[in-house]
Amino acid sequence: MSTNVVTYESHEHIAVITMNRPEKHNALNGEIEEGLHQAWLRFRDSDDRVAILTGAGQKAFTAGADLYSPPEIWRFTPGVGVELEKPVIAAVNGVCVGGGVVLVQFADLCVAAEHAVFSYPEAKVALCGGLISSVAARIPHKLAMEMILLGEKITAQRAYEFGLVNKVVPQTELMAAAMGYARTLADNAPLVLSLLKRFVGRVLPKGPSELAGIGRRDVAVVMSSQDAEEGKASFREKRKPVYVGR
């Protein structure tokens, strides 16, 4: 799968998923919402064992939500919009704003370029979807509150000190560092990785917006199913439905 705004490349069980709006600093819009949602579905159902998520260009991972075409961020957040039991690595190649920080927090590992800058400015612009609250389950409480309530810019080094980032590297080494993690993960036992990621998911508390997104995801699966269409058709045709469980 490859679209104008999201690309998916696969090699040796490693998927590289790229937000591709560099002229707009990879701002998150409705097209990226759908592109990333489909990319996570493909990754879930493929033979790929690990995914790297990054942004096109060297200036931005993503500048956050495009206010002219705002997305539903829960739909393309890994583990929320699409249930995943495979590891995801974020490779942050520049500014990472708003929904980009959400994507990083739900990734399992993160590599950041030295010039990367993180910010979550919702408190400054009076807009909020709430998914960021789950970051308090992933980094220390006071640091989470500093980041999400103050809305100030945080350097890659500071994000590393927060525990939001695993490794900070020069821009030229970013994808090599992410690939280093990915190759190790791709060589590890897939069933063990899946089991441990699933178990860790049960350990981490989930915020209200995260739970709401998961609920909407699960309901959408039923409402868009073959059985749902059969149910409507049988009602119209006044016959007994024949369900197949999908």
Image: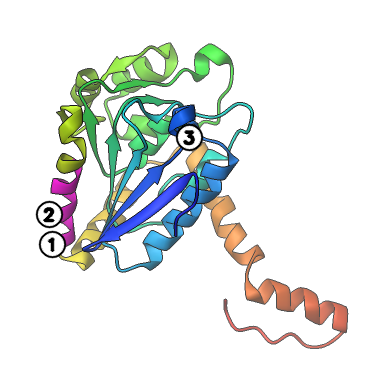
What numbered label is drawn on residue 187? 1
Q: Quadrant of residue 20?
A: top left
Residue of label 2: 184
Amino acid at dot 1:
Asp
The earlier-in-sequence mark between 3 and 1 is 3
Query: What residue sits 45% from the left and 37% below the top?
Result: 207
Label 1 close to label 2 by CB (< 8 Å): yes
The earlier-in-sequence mark between 3 and 2 is 3
Check if residue 187 falls in the magenta segment: yes
Asked if residue 67 can be seen in this view, the reply is yes
Query: What residue sits 47% from the left and 29% below the top?
Result: 23
Q: Which residues are magenta?
A: 178-188
Residue of label 3: 131
Query: Callout 2: few (<14), some (14-19), or many (20+) C-alpha neighbours within 10 Å?
Result: few
Query: What residue sits 38% from the left and 62% below the top?
Result: 44
Look at the picture and state if 177 lies above or below 237.
Answer: above
- Please identify the quadrant where the C terminus is shown: bottom right
Percent x, y of residue 172: 17, 32
Amino acid at dot 3:
Leu
Q: Nearer the viewer, mark 3 or mark 1?
A: 1
- Please identify the quadrant where the N terminus is shown: bottom left
Q: CA distance from mark 3 to mark 1?
A: 32 Å
Check if residue 73 falls in the magenta segment: no
Q: CA distance from mark 3 to mark 2?
A: 30 Å
Percent x, y of residue 148: 41, 20
